[in-house]
Image (cartoon, coloured by chain):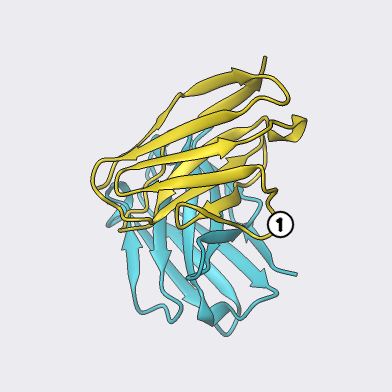
Amino acid sequence: EVELLESGGGLVQPGGSLRLSCVVSGFTFSSYDMSWVRQAPGKGLEWVSGISGSGGSTYYVDSVKGRFTMSRDNSKNTLYLQMNSLRAEDTAVYYCAKFNQGTAFDDWGQGTLVTVSS
Amino acid sequence: DIQMTQSPSSLSASVGDRVTITCRASQSISSYLIWYQQKPGKAPKLLIYAASSLQSGVPSRFSGSGSGTDFTLTISSLQPEDFATYYCQQNYSTPYTFGQGTKLEIK
């Protein structure tokens, strides 16, 4: 059974940092591209960043470029999102999602809430 | 960036109704279009990929069509468990943008 479990969310002050983790099981992690998708309270979904299976390529939405860094440790089956210089508008539930090249984002974690507030 | 526009933003319907949700891309995305269903407090669930391919385990009352810039999601006969918010997403190029969502409510 495929499982994705995010952690690391919490309350942080504007300008602060957080590192999110997503531990996966039930599939060959290194074979799949992965993404982070966020959802602000009461709002829609926003794709934030993506990473290739090897970790050699990363992609970001413009609003987080230079502030967020996505990485992965395939030996630990873990995905990361380092978030720096956090802003109030980064407040959201952050989901990790597995991208199946034959289909789409077919498996998602339960999400972790990040709240940026003073 | 490619902009995705869904319509309507909300929709009231009854059990048994046939409903259609549309999604328009700001430029051609071929068939790189995905549909998700999301219920409150839950992660999105993949329904349709490649514009018209039904994800394994999804009921056949869901169908998708379109290519280029115009796409539709159709639910042939609404069931109580279908009342949720639906999102389209393009996976043609990064950033993989979503539509703003369509909230399907019980009439």
**Rendered view: A20 above or below B19:** below
Relative depth, front residue between A64 and B11:
B11
Amino acid type shown at disc 1: Gly
**Rendered view: B57 above or below B75:** below
Residue at disc 1, secondary structure: loop
Give the quarter of the image for residue B94: bottom left
**Rendered view: B90 above or below B106:** below
Label the yellow chain with its letter: B
Visible in this render: residue A105?
Answer: yes
Q: Residue furthest bottom?
A: A75
Visible in this render: residue A11?
Answer: no
| Residue found 45% across the figure and 58% down from its top | B50
Q: Colour of chain A?
A: cyan
- The residue pinned by badge 1 equals B57
Where in the figure is residue B97, as x and y percent of width and height? Answer: 37, 47
Where in the figure is residue B83, as x and y percent of width and height? Answer: 67, 30
Q: Is residue B90 left or right of residue A10?
A: left
**Which of the image's four quarters has the C terminus of chain B?**
top right
Relative depth, front residue between A104 and A7:
A104
Name the chain under label 1: B
Give the quarter of the image for residue A25: bottom right
Give the quarter of the image for residue A82: bottom left
Q: Is residue B2 left or right of residue A69?
A: left
| Residue found 71% across the figure and 57% down from its top | B57
Relative depth, front residue between A70 and A44:
A44
| Residue found 54% across the figure and 52% down from its top | B48
* Label 1 packing within 10 angstroms: few (<14), some (14-19), many (20+): few
Where in the figure is residue B99, as x and y percent of width and height? Answer: 41, 38
